[in-house]
Image (spheres, rainbow, N blue to C red):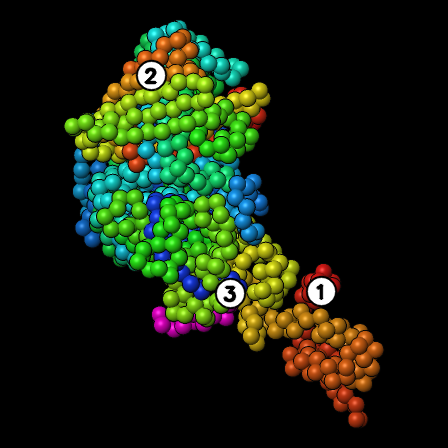
Amino acid sequence: MRRVLAALVISSLLAFVPEGLAEEEVSVEFHEGAIGGELLAADITWVLLAGWVPEARVALEGVSVPDGLTFYNRTFATTQGDLMGSRLPVHSSSEVTAGSFSGVQADAEGFFSLFLKGQGGQVLIGASQSSLRVYDGDSCLAAIIEERQWNPYLVRQEDKCGSGGVSLAEGGGHVQTESDLAFSFEDVLSIEWLGVRASCDNSPNCVSSGAVRARQFDIPGTEESVGTVDTSHVAFRAQGPAKGSGHFSAIAFGGPSLDLHVDGWVRLPLAEAADPGCGSCFNPENRTVWATGELLLEDLRPVPGRSDRLQTRMSGDVQAFRLDEEYMDPASIFGSKAGFVAAGAAGVAVSWVAWKVAAALVHRLGAEDALTHPRRRRIHEYVHENPGTTFRELSRATGLSAGNLRHHLSILTRTKVLVEHTHRSTVRIFPNHGRYDDNWRSVVFLREKPLADLHAFVKEHDGCSQSDILDHFQALGWSRSTTQHRLLKLEGAGLVETRPRGRRKLYSLASARPPVHTLQVLQRGLEAQS
Amino acid sequence: MKIARLAYAICAIALLAGCSGNDASDSPGLETLPGTVSEPTSPTEGPPAPITVNTSPFNFTLTGCVGAETGFTWPPGTGPHPSVPPGWEPAFRLGDVVDLEMVSCERVAWGPFERGPVSMLFELHGQFNSPTECERGDWNRFRMLNSWWVDDVELAAFMQEELALNTTLGRLSHEVLTVGPIREVIWTWNIDGHDDSTVTFRDHQRGPFKSTYAHRIGWFDESRLFVMDMATSFQLDMGNIGHATGRMERPMMYSSYGISEYASRGTALDSYEATATIHPYEDFACGES
């Protein structure tokens, strides 16, 4: 099944040969940098999510807890008044172990933190601006998330992320609630949370939450007070796949080696060729790489023995490229418009990774979520007004590059907002509200202005003969053979039908006609084009 | 819902307590994405690009830096009197703090600039009483800018023009000496017509201690206020705050009473990185942006 799916995906990708898609990749190493835009990340081994505003929320489904779980109870105290900002240390800690559960569903709103560790993890984030960092096993969270903000509201930070790798962090002390999020793990190994409601498939005594209690005490005779926060963290070994989605205030995730698909920009400071011995390879020579577009950073990992440098293979639909302050033609770095087919297996593999991540995650997004993105709204509006549009027309109309459009279109089709149909060598895009399910081929034909004109003539002259039609359009400059060919097209598409009368052929609209609404929309579209 | 309410209550307490100052709507927090404009304001002409990379003047990143910081607290009422925005006059003075933060970075990404090495020095003070609205958000220390030194002429002009920054185009340098188990990091800076200012930081090379610090730094002109949140990460000598000694010459605030000799706390900072977002306001109370 997976092979079939892969074949389908690759063939569908090959059907869209994006203009400008890079045919080459460059291997670079660079100082810790940053990325921004829509982000798909694959091969993550841990993720930490946190929320601290009402809009933040997360839902998690389907994990099993084979060995029970552990509560970590802690109390933190803070002060205000003249001592504002002082934080007192943890003054209590205890651990309680409870039973085991299966099929845990969990969700949280507003104030929470959730840490998952596992294998085959993937994250999809809407708008993002993330820092790229090297981490070691002891400091993966402390080093990337400013402690003053997160402690004491986070799950425990010790021993979280394994033996080092590359991490991305976004949000930190600053709210990012506009960011959509979806994530999944093929196999979760452990989970820890705080402020999360949970339910279980087959256990009435399911863990309820990491409890949170806040209190405030005024200090008599002063204007000062002390606030305490009691938290009960819940931690457990888990197994099986898990998926989640939501909005976050902050996120951090990472792994030993990641594949990133960025629809936005990257800044890779102080970059150099990953293989300095390769004389013909692209070498930024210690300059900073800035790039925008649909970018792929494959096998992103720390440079061995360096605590602040990363390496990756970079490719993609690069729209702008800069080395320090010098703008360069992306084609001079990544090759010309040879595109996907010429890119060979490597290019397919890279995009396949990105697509696979998207496919695995976007089904978690509902149609409403999918349309929260302004670019997707723009695509949807255009398709609604121009049903049956082609990929290239849509790219031109929305101003999106082929790569960007393919990315957003994938989400809109996976969330069933739009639907794609193959018509000859083109793909036609329609709203997926059912109106075009049966007649989309007719709509496609009638998007061609000559066919639409011909169709309109037959409609206005019901029962007209072929010679009437040929004469009429010959006067407009069409050759008789062209008109006959177009009539055959309409007939073949079932849009017109003929009946013989003596030696003549009389034409009428076919009984199964596109609905009035469709024709009106098409007419408006054609008028706009003309 | 009870849990959610409880959570918001916790956040409220945390905000009041200053340990989690975070406000979605009112805070001058970081922007989500840098802005993009169609044309760079130069510095380097190149082939036309269909889309340019980040050129917002309101975000910058410092990469591959070394730095140092030192501060001097004058006895109450004896220190210099830097100007403050209207309404920010301090009600009383516990001690007049003047701080210096200096960095030398392999790369600075700011607006259309991506260049290096660039050195900077922030001269800061704490003699103000900021409006409550300006204190929202998450930061470790809030100070006002007296001067911002930079050794790149184009960057200095950009900062002045785009952000009304009181930039000083100066010469800055640093060198590292090893004296037995002691490391000396010597920073020197000056402008034409004035003697060198120099401060030596000493530490023990005992291995790095990773840390982060969130600066909030404000400045203003006749009608506008700018508030910058600069998140920094760096390594210290085992977290120790050491000594800094040297001379401060004009136009540094410290030397405004004719005193040059300088001795105070201070520390060198290794593996220094910073990202900053600047919030412009049309009033002095962080109300209208």
Magenta residues (range): A1-18
Badge 1: chain ID: A
Q: Tell me the quadrant of the picture where the C terminus of chain A can be found.
A: bottom right
* SS class, disc 2: strand
Within-10-Å neighbours for mark 3: few <14, some 14–19, many 20+: some
Q: Tell me: B40 left or right of A363.
A: right
Going 83% across and 82% down the picture, which residue do you hit? A471
Asked if the stretch drawn in magenta spans residue A5, the answer is: yes
Residue beneath disc 1: A526
Distance CA(mark 2)–CA(mark 1): 77 Å
Q: Position of residue A290 (x, y in %)?
A: 45, 48
User: In the displayed image of the protein, which residue is found farthest to the bottom?
Assistant: A503
Q: What residue sits 52% from the left and 33% below the top?
A: B158
Q: Which mark is residue A235?
A: none
**Residues behind callouts 3 and 2 on a single chain:** no
- Residue, disc 2: B247
Circle on res. A337: 3
Q: Nearer the viewer, residue B53 or A154?
A: B53
Do tag 3 and tag 1 residues touch (Cβ < 8 Å)? no
Outermost residue, front side:
B193
Viewer-proximal residue, B17 or A257? A257
Q: Nearer the viewer, residue B203 or A114?
A: B203
* Kind of residue at disc 1: Leu
